Image (cartoon, grey):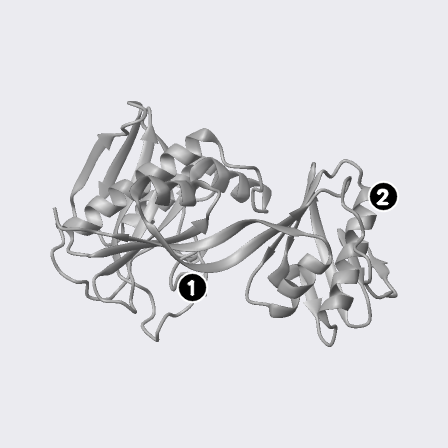
Amino acid sequence: MIGFGGCGSQARSCDEGGRVGCGGSRGPSVVQSYPSDMNSELFFEWDGRPDAGKHVSGEMYAVAGGPPYTADDEPEPEPTGGQGRPRTVGAVAARRDGALLGWAWVYEDPDHERVARVQTTYVPRQVRRLKTGYYDLLPPTAEEFEMVTGLYRRAADEARAAGYRTLRWTGQDTGPDGQAATALNANGHGECARYWSTEPATWQPPAGLPDVQVHQLPAHLTLATADAEVSAFIDGHAAHINAGESIRHENAEPRALAALIAELVTRLRRDHPEVTELTIWEFDDASVRQALPLAGLRITARTMDYELPLTPS
């Protein structure tokens, strides 16, 4: 679900691209569907139009009960290789009893010849985000696991038919994306990020960390020292930290940063006994990556780049 260049950037837009593809397209108006192997009520429908993503996004916005979807509702994607937006190959819609359950945007990798990438969306999760204004942190359902595997399978079939030789996607190894990779015999070829976790109730403060002078800020659970700041978002029984957004450090060395994170776990246990797990998503920050095991956290999942060879049928 992280796209464009894979690990390094977030794919945020699912509309048409303007680049020339690798040839062999089935044509812009083909819409085909077939049932899931696992559940006869789950169908996967292919739309090969250049603006296929726009149509299915509009349907999702209608499900959310919001105003009509426009291209302005999605921010500009990050440029990749100076090429701008990638070319859309098509979109796969997953439907159950005619209702839109999820969809996948299939687009051309602008940096690699005959390579397509795919990004999936589970509509119930995205609708909750649109209605509440924040990302849904609930664990995947059995339906989501089934749907994502089916979306990738259909995306692979259509990308192969369009002349692509490789399909790539990015996702968590323990989640629907990783399960789909296993089911489809895709290869993990790059680790992008890690999920670190601990249970505050059983966590023990590691020995040997330095003493730090900490003050608490009013926003969420936010702790700060002179050189660093960490903020946790509490959602029911879980606390979450996106390290790229919610851990700030300037001159703090890893042991001092670990001491600040350890103090946050201590206060979670003391002030928020309802929280049973803290999870930190960490990427592209060596200091944070060194600090987390020092603070007593362990890796529980990894964000991976997956690659599926598309052998001509």
Asked where in the image residue 292 lies, by quadrant, the reply is bottom right
The residue beneath circle 1 is 76
Where 64 falls versus 109 (above or below)? Answer: above
Viewer can see residue 48 = no
Where 164 falls versus 228 (above or below)? Answer: above
- 76 left or right, relative to 55: right
Q: Secondary structure at mark 1?
A: loop
Asked where in the image residue 153 lies, by quadrant, the reply is top left
Q: Position of residue 44 (x, y in %)?
A: 27, 35
Q: Farthest residue toward the front?
A: 207
Mark 2: give few (<14), some (14-19) or many (20+) Cα within 10 Å.
few
> Which residue occupies 30% across, 42% down?
184
State the CA–CA distance, disc 2 to disc 1.
42 Å
Residue type at mark 1 is Glu
Q: Position of residue 145 (x, y in %)?
A: 42, 35
Mark 2 or 1, which is nearer the eye? 2
- 10 left or right, relative to 290: left
Q: Could you tell which of marks 2 and 1 lies nearer the N-terminus?
A: 1
Q: Secondary structure at mark 2?
A: helix
Q: Nearer the viewer, residue 60 or 246?
A: 246
* Numbered tag placed on residue 107 in the rendering: none
Residue type at mark 2 is Arg
> Which residue occupies 72% across, 53% down?
296
Q: Position of residue 259 (x, y in %)?
A: 79, 61
The residue beneath circle 2 is 270
Q: Nearer the viewer, residue 3 or 266?
A: 266
- 164 left or right, relative to 54: left
Viewer can see residue 133 = yes
Mark 1: give few (<14), some (14-19) or many (20+) Cα within 10 Å.
few
Q: Position of residue 245 (x, y in %)?
A: 63, 61
